Amino acid sequence: MKKILILTFLTLFLVSCKEKSETEQAVAAIPVTLKIERFDKLFFEAPDAGLPDLERQYPFLFPKQFDDAVWLEKKHDPIMKELYDEVQKKYSDISLVKEELEKVVQHIRYYFPEEQTPRVITLVSEMDLESRVIYEKGLVLIALDLYLGKEHRFYELPEYLKITFEPRQMMPDLVTSFSQRYLQPAANKTLLALMIHEGKLLYLKDVLLPDYSDAEKIAYTSEQVKWVQSNEAQMWRFLVDKDILFDNNPRMAARFIDPAPFTKFGLDIDNASPGKAGAWIGWQIVRSYMKNNDVSLQQLLQMDAKELFENSKYKPKK
């Protein structure tokens, strides 16, 4: 009996590997060649007299309510120039970013055939944490000053935030921005709905970023991933025992979903836990659902959270 189970598992594993290999071959066959426009260099290195030309080339980067004096002041601001200099040190060669971008766009065009290859522009954002990467239809904007590495002196922030400044967070951030066109906010704000919403986003990263680790997708350290894996059953039991999965108190997001130094269970494990552990559990629920159901990625993104959960066959690892 044991041999039969092992053979069955091995067969399923090999079939899964073959399917993944065939998918990745199909993805790789999609022609994508990106040209990265270095607006950051054009803006800071062009002569002042060249500003009108830049405004004509990039009108969407120059809001009309600001006159040229505002942009010239920014161009000559010592702090902005220092930011730009640090970006050039890190990204004088943009080829690795281009390579990663092309892979992601290939995956996007495979799973979302209606999508076109976007125009890609890099810039310096004045450390705007809410606009790290913007992926609008046909356009990608990347703020390179937010990917200088977590130990850079510009980022005097808590550790749980510093990790988000790693260069390997650029593509996960791109997928987060891209997802907003296909993944609508949770219709109701129960904790379960919020967890499933985050789980769908993280599963989308599974699909579009197959070469990235779980830690990179969720912005954890490898030690934090090990912690949530080891404590998944205990965390799930807490949520069930406290009967809070269908609680729509706005504080639920702050406790279990939002980035934070730790997750607020109100238990002894809190200080050892990473933040947003509820998002991790939602991810495992979505993974379980996709393992046990034959639905497309688009169907998953539109699915009701409660229906998904009830058909997920989710069982936390002990």
Image (cartoon, grey):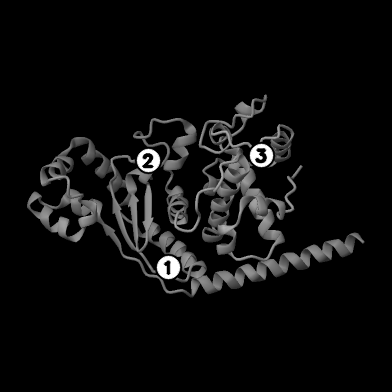
Q: Position of residue 235 (x, y in %)?
A: 69, 36
- Please name the residue shown 66% across and 54% down the image: 308
Q: Which residue is mark 2?
A: 129
Mark 2 to mark 1: distance in Å? 26 Å
Rendering coords of residue 96 (x, y %): 39, 58
- The reply, left or right, for residue 35 in relation to residue 54 is right
- Is 182 above or below relative to 113? above
Closer mark to the observer between disc 2 and disc 1: 1
Counting residues from the start of the chain, the first of labels 2 and 1 encountered is 1
Per the image, label 3 sits on a secondary structure element best described as loop
Q: Please, is residue 223 above or below residue 18 in the view?
A: above
Location of the C terminus by quadrant is top right
Residue that lies at the very extreme toward the right in this rendered image: 1
Q: Nearer the viewer, residue 151 or 238?
A: 238
Amino acid type for the residue under numbered disc 3: Leu
Kindly identify which residue carries mark 3: 245
In percent of the image, x 37 and y 58: which residue is there? 136
Q: Earlier in the sequence, mark 1 or mark 3?
A: 1
Instruction: For marks 1 and 3, give the CA distance.
Output: 36 Å
Percent across and percent down for residue 109 are: 46, 68
Quadrant where the image shows the N terminus: bottom right
Q: Position of 82 compared to 248: left or right?
A: left
Quarter of the figure with residue 256: top right
Q: In the image, what residue type sits under mark 1?
A: Glu
Spatial separation of the CA atoms under disc 3 and disc 2: 30 Å
Q: Which mark is residue 115?
A: 1
In the picture, measured across the screen, residue 78 lies left or right of residue 97, that is left
Residue 110 visible? The answer is yes
Q: Are marks 3 and 2 in contact (CB under 8 Å)?
A: no
Front of the two marks 1 and 3? 3
